[in-house]
Structure formats: structure tokens, C-alpha cells
Image: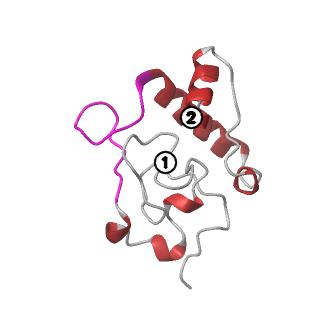
Amino acid sequence: MHEVDKLISILAGGARIIVDKPVDKISQLVEEERDLANALIKIAAKYGKFNEDGTGIWAGYDKASMNEVKDIGVKCSNCVLYQGGASCAIIASAVEPDGKCRFAIIPDGVVKMGK
């Protein structure tokens, strides 16, 4: 069983979980960020992953070539919901490590704003 499938089956039973991908990122989140990540995962488990087909919740996903803020760290690979490769815990379509969506949950200090 894929990790996301395991997570969905846990959530379908009503359990509250803490996102644990990857450990070094989740440990940097503040409580409200962890709660947001858990809420997004629970919504995706209940209604299906977010998509771009005009139904349900719009994720606002941008491919790497369209992500104008990847150089400062706003990108999938820095998000706690990113599962590696082309997989995200909440986005249905394939994602790219340098892509981004409007739900990015990135630990404080990872995004480097210009001076």
C-alpha cells in the first residue's frame, strides 16, 4: 500500500495525525502550520485530492517553468506535503520539485526573502 493510501485509510477512521514528511521539515513547523497541513490532508482524504479540472478546490498549481519564486525557496520540494518525485499528499496531478501551489506549507526560515 502506498504511503498516501495508508494515510487516507487512517484519516477515514477519524484519527488525527501529524504530517511526518520529511521529519526535518515537520519539526520546524509551528502548531498552526501543522494543524493546517493536517486539515488539508483530511480534506483530500474525504473529498479526493485537489485538482485543476474546474471542480472542487482549485489548487493554483504552477509548474516549475511558471514558478517565479522558486529561487527564494517557495517550491514543492520545500513543502511538508511534497512526497518526492512527482507526488504530493493533496494535489492529484503530477507535481515538480520546483513547482508550487497556493497551499505550500514551508517551514519558517526556508524561504529567503531579498534584502
**Mark-to-mark CA distance, 1 and 2:** 9 Å
Q: Residue 103: percent from the left, percent from the top?
A: 47, 48
Q: Which comes sooner in the sequence, label 1 or label 2? A: 2
Considering the image in quadrants, where does the N terminus appear? top right
Which span is picked out in magenta? 47-62
| Residue at numbered disc 1 | 87
Task: Bin the neighbour count of mark 2 within 10 Å (Cα to Cα): few under 14, some 14-19, many 20 and up.
Answer: some
Considering the image in quadrants, where does the C terminus appear? bottom right
Answer whether residue 45 is magenta in the image: no
Residue 4 quadrant? top right
Our reading of the magenta stretch's main secondary structure is loop
What type is the residue that disc 1 sits on?
Ser
Please report the residue visible at 59 percent of the width from the left and 39 percent of the height from the top.
Answer: 36
Please report the residue visible at 67 percent of the width from the left and 61 percent of the height from the top.
Answer: 108
The answer to whether residue 19 is above or below residue 82 is above
Please report the residue visible at 61 percent of the width from the left and 36 percent of the height from the top.
Answer: 3
Q: Residue 25: percent from the left, percent from the top?
A: 70, 55
